[in-house]
Image: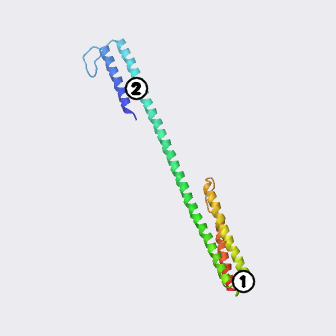
Amino acid sequence: MNFSSLFRAFDAAIALRDAAKRFKGEPSGGESGLTPAPAAGSALAGQIEARLTNVVVAALKEAFDRDHARLELERTQLEEQRRRAEEAMRLELRRQATDREIARFRLLGGAALIGWIASVILVLARISALSIAARGIAAAGWLLLLGALAAAFAAQGRLGAAALDSSAPAGVATGGVAALWLLVAGLAVSATALLF
C-alpha cells in the first residue's frame, strides 16, 4: 500500500486548513481568547474543509481500490502458478507410471523371447527322442511364446502412443495381461512337451 502519498495528501489538507484559519483570523491549534471570525469567513473555511475532506477521502479510496486490484492480481497469479504446478506434477506422475509399464512390457517380451529360444534349443537337442505329439505340443508352446512376445510389444507401442497424447486416459494397456498369460501358458506347454 502506498501510505507515503496518503500522508502527503493528508498533510497538504491540514496545511490548507491551517492557512485558511490564519486567513480568516481564527486561532490555529489550541489558542483561545481571540474573537471569533465572521460567519462568512467560517462558511468559506467550512467549504474548503469539506472539499479537502472529500479530496482526502477520494485519495484514500483510490489508494485502497488500487491496492485491492493489486491484491486480486497477485491472488490470480498465485492461483495460476498453483494450477501449473499441479498440472506439472500430474504429468510427471503419469510419465513415471508409463515408464514403469513400458519397462514391465519389455521384461515380459524379453522373458518370452528367452523362453522361446530355450525351448527351441531343448527341443532341437532332443529331437530324436521326442514323439510327433511332443513336437506338436512344443510347436504350440512356441506359438504361445511368440504370441506373448507380440502382445508385449503391441502393448508397449500402444502405451507409448498414449503417453504422447495427453488427452488419453492413463492406465495399464490391455495387452499386458494377455502377454503375461500367453507367456505363462507358453512356458507351461513347452515344459509339457519335454516331458513326453
Please identify the quarter of the rendering in which residue 64 is found: top left
Give 135 or 169, whichever is nearer the viewer: 135
Task: Please indicate, yes or no, whether residue 174 appears anywhere in the rendered image.
Answer: no
Q: Residue at x 38, y 15 (%)?
A: 44
| Residue 93: percent from left, percent from top | 54, 58
Which of the two discs, 2 and 1, labels the residue nearer the N terminus?
A: 2
Report the Cα–Cα distance between label 2 and label 1. Answer: 102 Å
Is residue 154 found left or right of 26 in the rendered image? right
Q: Which residue is mark 2?
A: 56
Q: Is residue 103 above or below residue 76?
A: below
Residue 31: x and y in percent read: 25, 20
Identify the amino acid type marked 1: Ala
Residue corresponding to mark 1: 134
Name which residue lies at 56% across and 62% down. 99
What element does badge 1 sit on? helix
| 25 relative to 71, above or below | above
Identified by mark 2, the residue type is Val
Q: Residues within 10 Å of mark 2 (few under 14, many from 20)?
A: some
Q: Quadrant of the C terminus?
A: bottom right
